[in-house]
Image: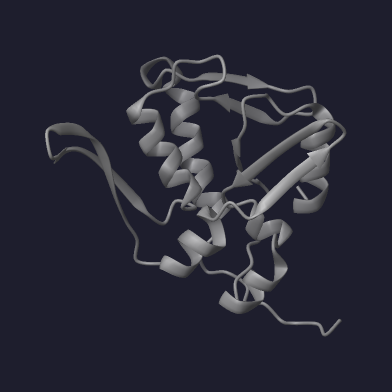
Amino acid sequence: MKEVKLRRPLLSVNRAAWSLAKKLCDQAEEFGVAVKETKSGATLIDAGIEAKGGLLAGRIITEICLGGYGKANIFYKQYDDLEIPSIFVYTDHPAIATLGSQFAGWQIKVGGYTAIVSGPARALALKPRELYERIQYSDTSDVAVLVFETAKEPPEEVIKQISDECKV
């Protein structure tokens, strides 16, 4: 396989997203999330498995998925006779924020556990590699931030595999 040089980032999607994740941790009660540290030292933020979550937590999680380089605004919009919450998302770094971070391009399968994940840790593990080669981006960070699209908390084996692949 031909070695492709990926541009080292001036922007770190993981470091930017981590500052948003810390906000959820620091204000867990206000955002309706539950925070716990695993045996391996990973921080898990539950925003809907057991915890209530909500629109405000969802807005920050959207910004986390965008690697901290996008903003999300929630507003109510009229659709015929129905008014529902809607979201407006914008970024100055579309390739990095969407393809390099938000895109749910990593499927985790360990034992009987399966989840689709999105978020900036993909830029550390280069999942999928071809995408990062195309946008010429990779991240360097001592933290990895992922959003799991699942109804079950990830077991320690999953956390270890992700940590190994992200080299954190």
- Residue 141 makes an appearance in the image: no
Q: Quadrant of the N terminus?
A: bottom right
Q: Residue at image x 83%, y 48%?
A: 164
Which residue lies most toward the bottom here? 2
The foreground one among 89 and 124 is 89
The foreground one among 54 and 168 is 54
The foreground one among 51 and 139 is 51
How many marks can you see? 0
In the displayed structure image, the side of residue 125 where residue 1 appears, left or right: right
Q: Is residue 74 above or below residue 40?
A: below
Q: Is residue 143 above or below residue 8?
A: above
Q: Residue at image x 42%, y 14%?
A: 29
In the displayed structure image, the side of residue 156 where residue 62 appears, left or right: left
The foreground one among 53 and 107 is 107
Instruction: Please state the horizontal and vertical placement of residue 90, each as a whole percent of the image.
Output: 31, 57
Q: Is residue 20 above or below residue 102?
A: above
Q: Is residue 24 above or below residue 135?
A: above
- Residue 76 makes an appearance in the image: yes
On the image, which quarter does residue 3 sit in? bottom right
Which residue lies most toward the front here? 80
Instruction: Please state the horizontal and vertical placement of residue 7, each as a whole percent of the image.
Output: 62, 77
Instruction: Please state the horizontal and vertical placement of residue 145, each as a whole percent of the image.
Output: 60, 44
Q: Residue at image x 42%, y 43%?
A: 62
On the image, which quarter does residue 53 sit in? top left
